[in-house]
Image (tube, rainbow, N blue to C red):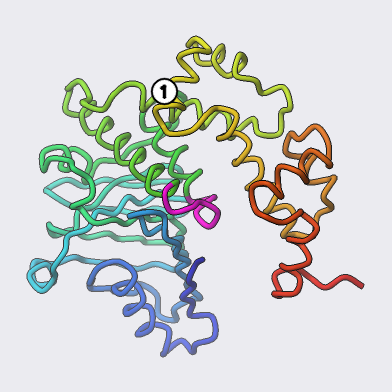
Amino acid sequence: MHSVLSTKELSATERAEFWRSAVSNTFIPLDVKLLEGAPRTASITSRRLGPFQVSRVEAGPQQVVRTSRLIAKDGEEYLTLSFQHWGTALLEQDGGQVLLRRGSFTVSDSGRPFSKELPTPFGFTAYHWPRTTTGMTDQSLRALTATVFSPSTAGSTASLVASHLTRLAGGADSYGTETAWRLASTAMDLLDILAQERLGREPVTQPSNVILVRVKDYMLRHLCDRELTPERIASAHFISVRYLHRLFQEDGTTVGRWLLLRRLEMCRRELARATSVAAAAGRWGFVSASHFSRVFKATYGCTPREWQAASRTAGLLPATA
């Protein structure tokens, strides 16, 4: 489920006040100053993912400021990781100043004053969560705030964080509660590793957690491949098949089960676009439509065609001619 706040149907006069309220209510109380005379259409699309609120924000030039006055009026403190899609953002916190460009990200802490200026039209995704859920020290958090991370180097921790969060945002509507919390927990572990690297320390997070995230990311990128076997996955990560199975066992599942559920999730999305059962099964690595139908029913309690029919009745699919 997701919520959408948009100024599309509002007049220019109404847009400014609505947007100021929407930003503060979605995230934390902020002073919002629009930097254009006639505010353009702006929107915030938000989803829940475990402790994370994942929000896609698209708007025109503006400045947001978190003052000591607003902090004093607040209760719980929050962290926000912003991943820039287009436009630029200048963030100041803890005496540091960083410029975010497309593809980079940074973290801000609502417990300390900060300002963020976006001088041109922009789009970013914000991952917003209570600070109390991280388990990170204040020193570690300060290593992340007002620091720009560019995931341009393949295989780097920053690249891994960006890839993992992008996957989370893309699948936020399809994860169950337990899966959502596990994936969010992994994201916070990765952020802690990023902070420890910046501080020049050895990460306290177990290396197996990092390997598992890399393995899952690889599997997600190769879901369509019918030859995606445990042997191939292990070889791609220079680990043994036995160790691969142990990683998933420690995560409470198996390699085959995790892969099957991800493929089924993608098939459900395909079916929601009125795709045929055979086409969805073939696209996402199932050997046959009949095999796909059997495992779909075993997992969801109905056949793919029954699910499409129920979705059409509920208005989620276009009616057939």
Q: Position of residue 88 (x, y in %)?
A: 39, 53
Percent x, y of residue 40: 49, 76
Magenta-colored span = 169-178
Coordinates of residue 193 in the picture (x, y in percent): 27, 30
Q: Residue at x 38, y 56 (%)?
A: 126
The C terminus lies in which quarter of the figure?
A: bottom right
Identify which residue, 174 or 220, lies in the foreground.
174
Magenta segment includes 171: yes
260 vs 10, left or right, is right
User: What is the quadrant of residue 161 in the picture?
Assistant: top left
Kind of residue at badge 1 = Ile
In this view, the residue in front, 246 or 172, is 246
Q: Residue at x 21, y 47 (%)?
A: 97
User: For this rendering, which residue is in front, 27 or 284?
Assistant: 284
Q: Which residue is mark 1?
A: 211
Rate crowding at label 1 as few (under 14), some (14 to 19) or many (20 or more) other CA atoms within 10 Å. some
